[in-house]
Image (tube, rainbow, N blue to C red):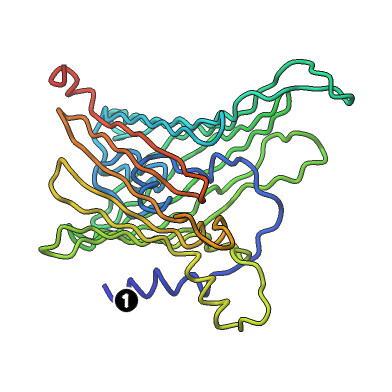
Amino acid sequence: MKLLFQIVVILPLVTFSQVGGEHGYQILNLSSNARSAALAGSTVSIADGDISQFFENPATIDSVASRDIFLNINPYFTDAIVFSGAYAIEMKGFGNVVVGLHYLDYGSFERTDPTGSLLGEFNAQDYAITVGKAHKLGPVTIGGTIKVLHTSIDSYGSTALVGDVGGIFRANDNWTIGMTFSNIGGRISNFNELTTTTIPFDVKIGTTFKPEHMPLRFTLTSNNLVDSNVVEETSGEGRSNEQVEKMLRRVNIGAELVLSDNFQLLVGYSHKRKQELKLDEVSGGAGFSYGIMLHIKRIQMRYSRSTFHAAGGSSFISFQTNLNNFGSIL
């Protein structure tokens, strides 16, 4: 356990590489489910039957049951809203395949001419259609997904085909380690010839562990491991302080209070989000997140809240069940 903790915390200091360009496909940067949102925004090491985790790490599909279904709604800011959903299908001789959709609707915008006269409205959307499969080899599971990405603004659009590769190692029933390589691929089409939008490739590593005889389950996730610009260069603070700041911005911390199989409380902290979105005089809770899980009549319900700045945050509501139990629910 001590060795793994050193890997998750120290690895961010030694895995910097430059990634150029301006990232597009913003749907890839948004949490797809209430659980990950409550645990600071990203998780790659939770593999306990939660189908929504396949968005984070495809290797978690090995813990999912056939006909599991998941739905999530996230009212974002102003008129923007995010939807996500996933469904597990058992294919004979092939095992479980999970299909998912992550959709961001930016809302409607006014279209005007150069003089400011109103000409009507236009819409903007992002979405990712994902198909994933995992294969278990003893304590190690390897998984992969293929994602079709599309972003559109009015009549302009861009499409990309990418994939994720992830792994899960189960040290024991209470300790898992996960790692993902996300968004490997390229564009199929672009808005126009002048656009230089890039796809946000990322590498994440994390661990989830529950100490024996404690009702707490902890999750540590190191992310942004290929981005050297996670913090701006500073002057006068010293290189050692800058390195510590870079490390802290790459580690998300989350904990689940497991009171029973039917009731849990969750909390998380993202130092990167706090530093980027806090006000000069007060953080306003930026970087903190929390949530709750209730399991009632075979329906698992989650609510979480992520605080972005003093002006407020964003809420997530998720539901998961298995269609084989639908008759029992009614």
> What's the amino acid at mark 1?
Leu
Which residue is drawn at the image coordinates 39% and 44% (left, top)? 305
Does residue 140 sit above or below 322 in this rendering? below
Residue denoted by label 1: 3
Does residue 171 sit above or below 296 in this rendering? below
Residue 115 placement, left or right of 222:
right
Please identify the quadrant where the C terminus is shown: top left
* Number of disc labels: 1
Q: Circle 1: is it few (<14), some (14-19), or many (20+) Cα within 10 Å?
A: few
Residue 284 placement, left or right of 172:
right
Residue 308 at x, y = what percent? 50, 49
Residue extending farthest to the front is 281
Does residue 231 sit above or below 128 in this rendering? below
Q: Give SS at disc 1.
A: helix
Residue extending farthest to the left is 213
Residue 324 at x, y = what percent? 19, 23
Which residue is drawn at the image coordinates 33% and 57% (left, top)? 254
Residue 28 at x, y = what percent? 53, 43
Which residue is drawn at the image coordinates 42% and 47% (left, top)? 306
Does residue 22 sit above or below 123 in this rendering? below
Q: Can you tell which quarter of the image residue 89 is in?
A: top left
Name the one closer to the observer, 92 or 109: 109
Which residue is drawn at the image coordinates 32% and 76% (left, top)? 3
Please identify the quadrant where the N terminus is shown: bottom left
Name the one closer to the observer, 82 or 170: 82
Residue 71 placement, left or right of 294:
right
Q: Can you tell which quarter of the image residue 35 is in?
A: top left
